[in-house]
Structure formats: structure tokens, C-alpha cells
Amino acid sequence: MKESNKPFDTLVKNIDNLLAPCLAQDWPNLSVERAEGCYVYGSDGRQYLDFLAGFGACNVGHNHPRVVAAAKAQMSKMIHTAMGVTNYEPLLYLADELGQVMPGSANVFFFGNSGTEAVDGAIKLARYYTKRRGIIAFFGGFHGRSLGATSVGSSKAKYRTGYGSLLADVYFAQFPYPFRSATPENPETCSQSALDELLRLFEYVIEPEEVAALLVEPIQGEGGYIIPPQSWLVELRKICDQHGILLIFDEVQTGFGRTGGWFAADAFDVQPDIFAVAKAIANGFPLGATVARAEIMKAWGPVSHGTTCGGNPVSCAAALAVLEVIRKENLLENARKQGTYMLDKLRELQRKAPIIGDVRGLGLMTATEFIKPDTDKEPNTEVVRRILQIALDKGLLLYPCGHWNQTIRLIPALNVTQDQIDEGMKIFTEAVFEAQK
Ligand SMILES: Cc1ncc(COP(=O)(O)O)c(C=O)c1O
């Protein structure tokens, strides 16, 4: 594949001179050659069971043959033209098909390239439509890396540091975190205290009539796989309705079957006004979308927003194949079934491992939070680091999340089998026991 006669190893050793450190210096920097289904194959000749699925982008498994075939077929016809100037089949078929699986009546699309852009678009659309300035986001949330998306994120202060002024008129309210609340056994209490804080913002900081949107991940991803009580999301919806505020769900990580329904909005039975979706939409091909019901989206007049490569024909063709695979292979059902199975196994492990503070999940959006035993739930970043490395050495690829990187997400592709979950859980269990010694 390469023109150069330099061995790949030489380039890897020189990576710091080739790539920005913010890109190149992440753990574990594993060199890989190919990936298939639930496995990635390292340049070291080893097979790794992948419980990260490309940061949750490869929900139908790596290189699913149906997705590869659809992308190849589209590539041989047309890779790129200019959306708007030209129309093409995959774009409009995708809008039509996706509209049928989006919850509620959100079925008009702006296609971009990524989750970040989908969120930026959602913020722009909300301000444009409401003619209001305020955006309220939630502590611990993560929405991407552009200046706009960085401004509404608060999973780690270091993500916001060094960039001067961020977007104005962004405010933060509490996201209910049952495990770390004063009453973990009663999530409704932490839901109420989070709502009280939001209402205090309205009283002391910005009047609701000036707020364009509440922006929320229905389950926080990067922030730690935190599942809020359903009642909290229901109340957010009511508050928005009361004050003419738009509710934006960032479903970039929760979407496309990850939680066992098409979207988390289905699981919580709460409909936002605007969705941001990306990641698994095209199983790794760059694609994202801001989605809203017609009344809102139709206010976004010509040239008010735009893109060059967003809605790329190859990505759209891949996305159509993803929808077909999720349906034909019953992957929503499999996500629920295997997710329940994995959660049971994790709970079993929790009973034997005092370093595990909490296990939680919805569908196959599953995670384990680690604490220092005999403390008041002190986050255990060090043990997580050890577990990740031991698991990798044994052939399981995992990645952390959470404000202190104290949580490990376990998010295999949605077509993972029970045998593969067993294989992963065997390694994870060994790693937990070895790390807690
Ligand atoms: C909830 C959420 N929103 C937005 C983003 C940003 O998406 P992207 O990296 O595709 O720009 C991410 C990425 O992890 C995410 O998890």
C-alpha cells in the first residue's frame, strides 16, 4: 500500500515528529493492520478483542461486509460532488430512511462530517430559530472539539484550557449522577437537586426567556457512562415546553442501537426538539447529522449554514447499509440481550472485587466504575490504568471514561456474541483481580 520504502516501525518510532501530540499521545497507541467484526489485528501479529468499537463508531462490527460492499459500489460511481449544487441518491435515500427510525417527528436533516459538527449545528440552529442567546449544558458533558463544542463541554477542564475566550452565553447546570449523589439508593432525590440547580440558574443568572436550548447527552459518555433518572429528562422536557426552550439531545454516542433502542430518546421516552447524531451512523465513515422536526429545520434558510464534504455519497451509502444491517440482523435485540448478560457478569464480579464501586449500563452501553476500597468512593484512576494495560496484554482492548478516568467502558459491536462477551469478561475479571492485589 505504501509508496515509501521506510518500514512502518520507523514511522511509529518517529510519531512525535509526524503527528500533533494531542493526537498521537493517547494510550495505548497500538499499531494495528486490520480489523474485522469484534476484533482488531495488531502489527505485532496478535488478535485483540475490541470492547471499544472505534469509540462506539463501529456498532455493526469492523468492516461489516454489507457496509464495505455498499461503500465500494458507491465509490466506483461517485466519491464526492457538492451537496446542494447536486443531488444524489444515497443522500436523499438516507434522509428518507433515517427519518423513519428517528424518534418523534425529527426527520429533517443537515448532514455534516462528525459529532462535533452535529453539535455545533444544533447550537447554531437553536439560536437561529429561537433568536435567543443562552445555551445551558450540563457538568460532565462532552460534545466534541471545535470551539463551539468545546465551549459546551465540561467533562474535564483541561479540554477547555489554553484557548482564550470560548463561546459566550453558555451556562452549566448539574447532571444527576446517582452513584456519587448523597442518596444513591434514591435517584429521584438527586434528580430533584439537579433540577433545583437549573431553576436557580434561571433565577440568578439568565432568565428562561433568553435561553435558546438545553443541551444534554441522555447518558453521559466521555463523562463516565452516567445514566440519569428518567424523571430528570422528563422534567427537562417540561421546563423547555414551559419556556419555549429547545431541548437538544446529543446522541452521538448513545445512538444507532448502542442503548438497545435506535436512540436513547426511545429508552427514556422523552423526545427532544433537535438531535445531534454521528459515530455509528456510518460505522466509521465520517458522517454526522443535526436533525430536527420540519418546523424548526425549515427556518434555517439557504446559506445560513453549510459544508463541503458533509453528507458525502460514500458515507451516506455506508449509512444506508448500517440501517439495513441493524434491522436484518436484529441488532437492537442483540444489544439488549448481550448487554443484560454482560451487566449480570459485571455485577457478579463487583460482589468479589471491592475496587468496583458501581456497574451500570443500558443495552450495550456498559461501564464499571472503580474506587479505592475503604474510602468514601474515592476515584481509583491508578487501578484503572493497571487494568487497562493488563487486559491489553491479555488481548482485550478497553478505554476509560469519567472525570478522573476512573471508569472503564465496555462497548463491543452490537453483533457481539455471548461467547465473545465470555471471552472479554474472562480477561477483564483476571485483570481486575491482578490489579487489585
Ligand atoms: C456525546 C458526544 N458528542 C460529540 C462527540 C464528538 O464527536 P466527533 O468526535 O465525531 O466529533 C463525541 C465524541 O466522543 C461524543 O461522545
Image: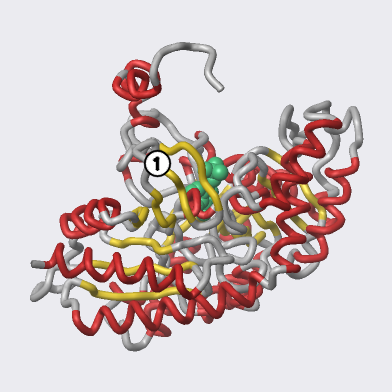
Q: On the picture, is 27 further left or further right than 309?
A: left
Q: Is residue 290 left or right of residue 159?
A: right
Choose between 99 and 138: the one closer to the eye: 99
Residue type at mark 1? Gly
Q: Is 178 located above or below residue 186 in the figure?
A: above
Residue plotted at (37% across, 41% down) = 45
Query: Is residue 250 at all visible to an observer of this figure?
Result: no
Q: Quadrant of the C terminus?
A: bottom left
How far from the left and from the top, in percent, is residue 297? 80, 50
Q: Position of residue 207 (x, y in %)?
A: 55, 58
Disc 1 secondary structure class = strand
Residue, x 61% and y 41% (percent of image)?
114
Residue found at x 64% / y 72%? 332
- How packed mark 1 is, by other alpha carbons closer than 10 Å (few <14, some 14-19, many 20 or more), is some
- Residue 330 x/y as whole percent: 69, 73
Quadrant location of residue 272?
Answer: bottom right
**Does the rendering let one see residue 78?**
yes
Residue at 61 percent across and 53 percent down: it is 280
The spot of residue 110 in percent (x, y) is 76, 44
Which image quadrant for residue 426?
bottom left
The one nearer the camera, 92 or 3, is 3
Ligand 1 under 8 Å from disc 1 Cβ: no
Nearer-the-camera pick, 67 or 229 = 67
| Residue that mark 1 sits on | 42
